[in-house]
Image: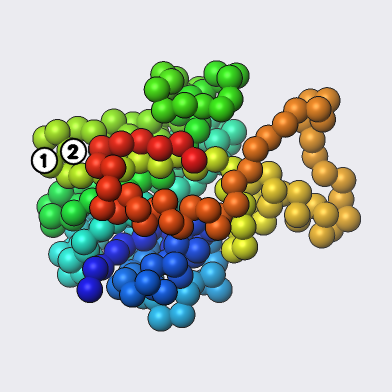
Amino acid sequence: MTKVLITGIAGLLGSHFSRYLLAKGYDVVGIDDFSGGFKENLADGVYCSTLNLADLDAVDKFFKEQKFDYVYHFAAYAAEGLSPFIRKFNYTNNLISSANLITSAINYDVKKFIFTSSMAVYGAQNVPPFTEDMQQCPLDPYGVAKYAVEMDLKLAKEQFGLDYTIIRPHNVVGVYQNIWDRYRNVIGIWIRKSMRGEPLTIFGDGLQKRAFSDMAFYNEPFEKVMTQYGGEIFNI
């Protein structure tokens, strides 16, 4: 049976994709510290470890014990606007932790590493939709961390043969979304404010447009890149 690790399994992406894989007969193991996700989001029967991804020895031991075939790295603290003020926290969670997972994936012959990056790698280029051939130029530490992991994966493939695919999701919405974080996820923020009878915060003149992605359309592409599109990047 194919064994898959999902980091951030109690979050929006992880909770949905884990259920999708379980229904198709995969063996699914998760890692989540529940800083953004919730235990109630976990699928029945999923084993979820709370190990600290910033601890390389602990990550390496976990990989040695579990022997994963594939890794989906969804875990991140995606507070882009806040990231300049929490630089160490940002880089520890979004870069160092990712590097540790990549290192262990190399050490224990993981077949493929699938990483969710961010449109934040493009910075302030005001020309949506963003295309994969556009130059990355992040403007904040969150975008820098995501771009650095993208580059590290490219090097890991060139130097050690670790296959990978990078997916950059865009404003994903769905059930199991965290609506309690003050700094992330505009839809969640609006839902929370609406529940409390508070006015919705809108920046600018209110005429701007934003595109949102339904989580229901991510599961099939996530599974497809498990065995296809090595070394490629996709904006969704």
| Image quadrant assignment for residue 71 | bottom left
Q: How many marks?
A: 2
Label 2: how many residues lie within 10 Å, few (<14), some (14-19) or many (20+)? some
Q: Is residue 50 visible?
A: no
Instruction: Determine whether, in the image, residue 196 is placed left or right of residue 28.
Output: right
Q: Which residue lies at the image location 33% right of the left edge and 49% below the top edge? A: 225
Q: Amino acid at mark 1?
A: Phe
| Image quadrant assignment for residue 167 | top left
Specify the quadrant that holds the N terminus: bottom left
Element marked by disc 2: helix
Q: Could you tell me if the residues under marks 2 and 1 are in contact, i.e. CB atoms within 8 Å?
A: yes
Q: Which residue lies at the image location 58% right of the left edge and 19% below the top edge? A: 127
Cα separation between marks 2 and 1:
5 Å
Q: Which residue lies at the image location 59% right of the left edge and 43% below the top edge? A: 171
Counting from the top left corner in percent of width and height, residue 152 is at 26, 34
Counting from the top left corner in percent of width and height, residue 150 is at 32, 34
Counting from the top left corner in percent of width and height, residue 22 is at 39, 73
Label 1: how many residues lie within 10 Å, few (<14), some (14-19) or many (20+)? few
Q: Is residue 93 visible?
A: yes
**Rendered view: 127 above or below 219:** above
- Which of the pair 181/105 is nearer the observer? 105
Q: Amino acid at mark 2?
A: Ala
Per the image, the residue denoted by label 2 is 156
Q: Which residue lies at the image location 40% right of the left edge and 22% below the top edge? A: 133
Res. 24 mark: none
**Rendered view: 213 above or below 38:** above
Per the image, the residue denoted by label 1 is 160
Counting from the top left corner in percent of width and height, residue 168 is at 45, 39
Element marked by disc 1: helix
